[in-house]
């Protein structure tokens, strides 16, 4: 059950059958002891067999310390369903959103954005654990492994998390900021050219669509112009003639809705990375990276 990378999923021309039931994790899959402190990280070890979460937490800035040993990686995604929306309905929308048919993908992501608020999460692979801090107001949230959507006939298991009490806390300190914005040319990242790998990064969605922020290491000499050439060639059904990526995995911040923030902290290998968003556009159904939502960022100490 090794997942395909989002890049592979985005460019494949094969049709993937994505049918399967919805499962809400029961007592055996959820920790019986509530996490009573919003300041205590929630440890999430993701495996091909699933993961566990506490049943409740205090409202506020909640940190999830996410890791995996599975080579294909996993992606913790949190959502809050809007009034009257069922998990079955939302799951059907997600299955459309990951379709290889752009029209279906546009319809699916548009419906998902209408029916739920994406609150964030973390994408992880074995070499890089990710701490993600998410503001959770009082209410009910569902967390799941987004990579299950790429496994044929896999059930989507949701973990229900209740945030209780009054929201307390201020935005945690951070050393870098990444904005997700909409421009006349399409969705884009506004990001520093270099980020200290020891810094906590605040990711802020200023647009009106779901966006994520994934980091994938690139080969020496790859800049944003070369990424544009690569994605344009693939979008037009052409062979770009080169592979800009130095690895087949990525790590980073899962999808958030417009107007929301999340903070991530991870320790990846120093070097140059492509900052990517593969969420499909809600008009064209084309993944945002193919529309120009990518940037090359150097992870290195600020003194270097």
Image: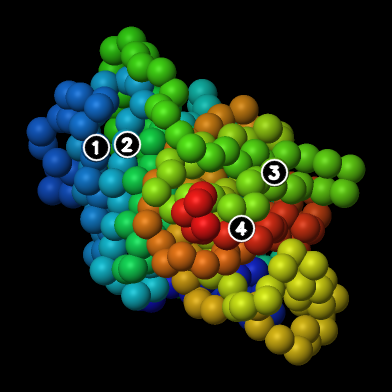
Compute the Cα span from label 4 to label 2: 24 Å
Res. 63 mark:
2
Give the mark, 3 or 4, whose residue is nearer the N terminus.
3
Mark 2 and mark 3: span between their CA atoms?
24 Å
For the rendered model, the colour scheme is: rainbow
Residue at position x 42%, y 29% from top? Answer: 173
Secondary structure beneath disc 1?
loop
Q: Which residue is mark 3?
A: 190
Mark 2 crowdedness (10 Å alpha carbons): few <14, some 14-19, many ≥20: many
Whole-number angstrom distance, CA of label 1 to CA of label 2: 5 Å
Q: Residue 282: horizontal and vertical position, in percent?
A: 74, 47
Of pointers 1 and 2, the one earlier in the residue sequence: 1
Give the alpha-carbon distance from disc 4 to disc 1, as whole Å.
Answer: 28 Å
Task: Identify the residue at the far left of this view.
Answer: 33
Whether residue 30 sits left or right of residue 232 in the image: it is left
Q: Which mark is residue 41?
A: 1
């Amino acid at each position: 059950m090794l997942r395909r990378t989002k890049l592979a999923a985005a460019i494949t021309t094969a049709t993937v059958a994505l049918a399967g039931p919805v499962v809400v994790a029961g007592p055996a899959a959820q920790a019986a002891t509530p996490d009573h402190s919003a300041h205590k990280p929630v440890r999430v070890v993701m495996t091909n067999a699933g993961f566990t979460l506490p049943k409740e937490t205090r409202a506020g800035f909640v940190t999830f310390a996410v890791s995996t040993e599975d080579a294909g990686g996993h992606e913790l995604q949190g959502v809050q369903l809007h009034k009257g929306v069922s998990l079955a309905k939302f799951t059907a929308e997600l299955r459309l959103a990951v379709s290889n048919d752009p029209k279906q993908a546009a319809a699916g992501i548009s419906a998902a954005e209408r029916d739920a608020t994406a609150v964030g999460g973390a994408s992880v692979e074995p070499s890089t654990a990710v701490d993600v801090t998410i503001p959770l107001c009082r209410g009910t949230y569902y967390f799941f492994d987004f990579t299950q959507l790429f496994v044929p006939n896999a059930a989507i298991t949701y973990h229900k998390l209740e945030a209780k009490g009054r929201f307390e806390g201020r935005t945690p300190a951070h050393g870098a900021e990444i904005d997700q914005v909409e421009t006349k040319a399409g969705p884009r990242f506004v990001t520093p050219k270099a980020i200290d790998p020891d810094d906590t990064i605040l990711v802020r969605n200023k647009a009106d669509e779901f966006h994520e922020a994934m980091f994938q290491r690139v080969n020496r000499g790859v800049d944003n112009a070369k990424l544009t050439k690569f994605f344009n060639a693939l979008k037009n059904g052409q062979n770009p003639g080169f592979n800009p990526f130095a690895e087949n995995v990525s790590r980073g911040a899962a999808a958030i809705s417009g107007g929301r923030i999340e903070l991530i902290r991870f320790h990846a290998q120093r070097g140059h990375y492509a900052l990517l968003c593969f969420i499909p556009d809600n008009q064209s159904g084309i993944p945002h990276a193919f529309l120009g939502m990518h940037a090359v960022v150097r992870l290195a100490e600020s003194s270097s």
